[in-house]
Image: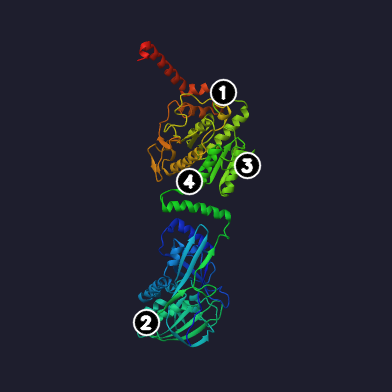
Amino acid sequence: MDLTFSPIQSFADASFFQKLSKLKLDSFKLDETAKKITGVVNIASTPQGENPAVTVEDSSFGDESCGSLYSQGAVLVIPGHITNFNTIEDFKRLDKAQFLKKAGSRLQELMENGDAIEDPSLLSSFEIICFADLKKFKFFYWFAFPSISSHWIVKSTSVIQEVSESVRDWVKSSDYAQRGHFIIKDGTAQALEQLISLPESTTSIHVGFVDSCLIPNKPSKHLQNFLSLLSLRGFKRVTVDIYRISGSSFTLELEHEDNGGSSKITGWERTNQGKLGPKLADLSALIDPVKLAEQSVDLNLKLMKWRVAPEIDLEVVKNVKVLLLGSGTLGSYVARSLLGWGVRTITFVDNGKVSFSNPVRQPLFNFEDVGKSKADTAATALQRIFPNVNSKGIDLEIPMAGHPVTNEQKQKADMETLDKLIEDHDAIFLLTDSRETRWLPTVIANVKEKTVINCALGFDSYLVMRHGVCGGLGCYFCNDVVAPTDSLTDRTLDQMCTVTRPGVAPMAAALGAELLVSILQHPDKHRAGSDATTILGELPHQLRGFLSSFQTMKLHAPAYEFCSACSKPVLDAYRDLGWDFVSSALNDSNYIEELSGLAEVQKQAEKAVLEMATDLSDDEWFI
């Protein structure tokens, strides 16, 4: 009777697709060439009466140890390839018959040139074609087990009563590639490589085959390629001892019958319904939604990396710790932009409450949030958007230059908290409503040499700038010839609210976030000069935008020697005196001007004007 085989099945563990997802983003990208992988056939745990299964998991990708699969003990390790297509259309359009024919031709070539004799595991090799939908976490895949047909007649079948010690040791050996196919000579197991040394006139042979199938008298289809190899080597009569670890082993006496035609190549796996077609692995229901969200965020960024800007460093963006001083319109939009860039640590600072006018302009707040703490509510909202973000809110009133001390214990504690917050973060955004609230953070951040991004709004204009460090580029206060003072007392309604066109804040916030990301891409970070460039393009010092003309100007200015916030005397005073310096600045704005040298600059300017007036006659004024 004709020899028949049990079909081979596949089992792809969920970890296999998770690793495929990572490799697709980090390594494969748009590459559709075949990649080497490894599968395992467990020859000990196949249930009685079932077909063998080739298993792949996360360690199948380039890991010869095959991870946990090896720990199961009695396994056969087989090589394979995976071809991942970029679109479902490419996956569907593939000529499956031609693909299998090429795989079979390669296998036959390995048989003919002796590679499959040196490494018999090649006889059981497999192919996978797939399409990974990483947005929906659905994977379409199809296994193929290329098999070259050869016609064999079963002359007799008998049960193996006793296995020799040599064969038993061979089957249990650690040589996973060799032990599945071997020669038996005088009851002794020998490597299949001995085929090469046999005389060409030899037409009969005794071989051993380790089988995972447990269907009686019906070996797995993996045996087919072994027999085809023997027929190519000219063997007409073959005795095959089929060894099963957990079932009855048996012997087949076979005779090759030449049908005169070319060898047929088969191997596409059938579905459970017996039809030819791919399988679908839908992991969306198995993955934790939070983990799913994180992978989706990473997906968008990594697509940017390997498709547009391969040199961009996403890890430095992901790991940066950002402090937002101000949780209103600018703070909300900056946080959303940073979240889109994958920033994982964002801290909000504010001492205000959500008002009825806020939700329509500040996207982290809803009507139900009115009356709640802005900082805490913004942090909570960010976590609802993306649970894996490390966001928190700090209720804090920033001590303001020109605003006299009213509660020294509280204001000193606020200063110390602000100092610690700036110390613990890498980048600080100044997003508050007044100039004087930005003065102390500017001083502290410069002392601690932190990255500072400043965003300020007018009715139809905005300023976005990065501060320099220790005498480099100028800060927000470098263009001022007076120290910051109380601008909040006795303000009218229009002065108490930030009156600006609704589109100005999101524009400024987006530019601020993009500026930070660009800074992080430069090797000198915030110390980079005004003419610096990064993988993302130019790295400006200041951006001043005007909606009235829809123009944006790029400007730069060096640090001012007598700046009220970043000059050396001011920074040294904060280092040396701490709260005593701050309290003096709060109680008397003239203190900062005297300390920084601005007072002397003002005196010299007034003196120059007087001298000019004295030198000119009344008539000369009208020339």
Pointer 3: what residue? 367
Mark 3 or mark 4, which is nearer the start of the sequence? 4
Mark with earlier residue (3, 2): 2
Q: Are marks 4 and 2 in contact (CB under 8 Å)?
A: no
Q: CA distance from mark 4 to mark 2?
A: 64 Å
Q: Residue tagged by mark 1?
A: 587
Looking at the rendering, which quadrant does residue 622 occupy? top left
The picture places residue 327, in percent across and down from the top left corner, at 56, 38
Secondary element under disc 4, as helix, strand or loop, is helix
Q: How is the image coloured?
A: rainbow
Determine the image quadrant of residue 82: bottom left
Circle 2 or circle 1, nearest the eye: 1
Residue type at tag 4: Val
Q: Residue at x 54, y 68 (%)?
A: 72
How far apart marks 1 and 3 lie (CA) works out to 39 Å
CA distance for labels 4 and 3? 32 Å
Label 2: element kind = loop
Mark 3 and mark 2: span between their CA atoms? 87 Å
- Residue at mark 4: 317
Question: Few, some or many C-alpha atoms within 10 Å of disc 2 (few <14, some 14-19, many ≥20)?
Answer: few
Specify whether 457 is left or right of 407: left
Asked if one can make out residue 92 in the rendered structure from this viewpoint, the answer is yes
Q: Secondary structure at mark 3?
A: helix
- Cα distance, mark 2 to mark 1? 102 Å
Q: Earlier in the sequence, mark 1 or mark 3?
A: 3
| Vertical position of residue 561 compared to residue 28: above or below | above
Mark 4 and mark 1: span between their CA atoms? 40 Å
SS assignment at label 1: helix
For mark 4, does the 10 Å Cα neighbourhood hold few (<14), some (14 to 19), or many (20 or more) residues? many
Reading the image, the residue beneath label 2 is 198
